[in-house]
Image: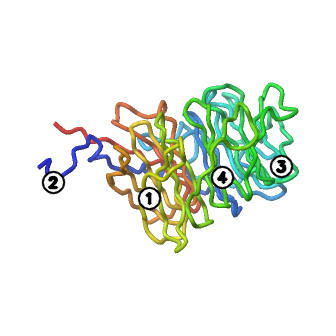
Amino acid sequence: MSRFVRASKYRHVFGQQGKKEYGYDNVKVTNSAWDTNVISASTRYVSLNWQSSGGGAFAILPLPSPFAPLPAGFPSKLPDLIPLARSHSGPVLDTDWSPFNDSVVASAGEDGKAMIWKVDSGAFDGWGQDGWEPQDFDPVARIDVSPRRVGHVLFHPTANNVLATSTGDHVVKLWDLASPESPKSVLGGHADAIQSLTFNPWGTLLVTTCRDRKIRIFDPRTGGDPVRVGEGHSGIKGARVVWMGDKDRIATTGFSKMSDRQVALWETGSLSNVKTITIDQTSGVLMPFWTDNNILFLAGKGDGNIRYYEYENDNLFPLAEHKSSDPQRGMCFLPRRGLSVSDCEIARALKVAANSIEAIAFILVQTV
C-alpha cells in the first residue's frame, strides 16, 4: 500500500465544526474594505472588527470552543448592544493578542493610531442578567503612529511589550510599549501599500508583502531598508505571508497575472522561489496559517473551504479540505497552547461568517 499512498500521520486529520450554539450569532462584522483577517484570538478571548457608528470599534468576547457551550449565562445570540472597544475615531482595521498575556490586545485604526487594551477578569460578569448594561472597554495606552491609517498590528514573538505596526505611508514601525512616544525602529523601502507582515519565531527577522509585488525581509533591530528583496506573485491583489516555523522558508499566497490563486514557497536566504502551486481561479484572498506540526492551512475569503497541506522536503502534500456552504469573511487560528489535547486536536480555526463566529477543530484520528 505504501507504493500508492504517501505515509503520513496527518493523513486522517479532519475538521469538526462546533454546534451552532457553541459559537456566536448576531455579530456585526465590519464592512471595511481593508484586507485583514478581521478576527484574532488568545487562549481566553477573541477580538472581532465591529461595524459601528460614530467611530471605530471592535468586540472582545470569551473564546468559543467546538467541544463545549459558552460560559454559563453567556448568550450565543449576542444582544444588539454589547460592550465594545470604541476609542478609535475611524474604523478598526486589525487586532492582535499578546503572546505574553492572554488578556492584552492591540488594535490598529484608520485614524492613524494603535491602542493597547487589557481585559479585566470580571469584564463579563452579569451578562444575560436582568438590569445588565454594557460597559465599553477603555484602552490602557494610545500610540500616535502615523497621520495615515495603521493597517496592521503585530506583537513581537519573544520580546515582551514590543509591537510592530504598518502604516499608510508604507513603513513598518516598531514600538517599545514602555515608552511609546516614538518608534524604536522604522523599516522602509516599500513602494506601495503593505499587505501583510510576520516575524520569524525568534523575532530576529520580519518579512512583508507589498502591493508592488515584492517580498522584503528586514532586520527589525537595525531598521532602515530591507536586507533582502525578491519578486513575489505577479498579481497585485492580496498577497499574504507566513513564516514556516523554525525553517528558512516562508509561504506566500497571492495571484498570478491571469488571476489564478497561488501558494508559493521561498528560501529566506536569497528569496528564491522554491515552489509555486496554482490553487484555482476564485477571486477571494487566500489566508495562510502555519502550525508547528508542519501543516499549512489555506482559507479563502468569500468561500467556505479550508485546504490543508503537509510540508516535507520543499513539497506541499494535500491532506484534505474542510468544506462549508457558509463563506468566510475572516479567520484566525488559536495559539497551540490553547488546544484540547484530550480531544486529539492539532489546530483550531475561528471562522467569521456573515453574522457569526464558529469554532472548527482539526482532529487527528487515532489509528492502530
Q: Residue at x 62, y 36 (%)?
A: 205
- Report, in whole angstroms, how far the alpha carbon at label 1 lies from the one at label 3: 36 Å
Q: Which residue is mark 2?
A: 4
Q: Name the mark nearer the viewer: 2 or 4.
A: 2
Give residue 25's quadrant in the image: bottom right
Q: Name the mark nearer the viewer: 3 or 4.
A: 3
- The residue carrying pointer 1 sits among few (fewer than 14), some (14 to 19) or many (20 or more) residues within 10 Å by Cα, namely some
Q: Name the mark nearer the viewer: 2 or 1.
A: 1
Q: Amino acid at mark 2?
A: Phe
The quadrant of the image that shows the C terminus is top left
Q: Which residue is mark 4?
A: 79
> Which mark, by number, is residue 276?
1
Q: Are marks 2 and 4 in contact (CB under 8 Å)?
A: no
Task: Give the mark nearest the N terminus, 3 or 2.
Answer: 2
Q: Residue at x 48, y 43 (%)?
A: 249
- Report, in whole angstroms, how far the alpha carbon at label 3 lies from the one at label 2: 55 Å
- Report, in whole angstroms, how far the alpha carbon at label 2 lies from the one at label 4: 53 Å
- Look at the numbered disc 4 and give the secondary structure of its residue: loop
- Report, in whole angstroms, how far the alpha carbon at label 2 lies from the one at label 1: 24 Å
Q: Name the mark nearer the viewer: 1 or 3.
A: 1
- Report the side of 340 relative to 300 (left or right): left
Q: Position of residue 117 (x, y in %)?
A: 74, 35
Q: Which residue is mark 3?
A: 112
Task: Give the mark nearest the N terminus, 2 or 4.
Answer: 2
- Look at the numbered disc 3 and give the secondary structure of its residue: loop
Q: Position of residue 235 (x, y in %)?
A: 58, 67
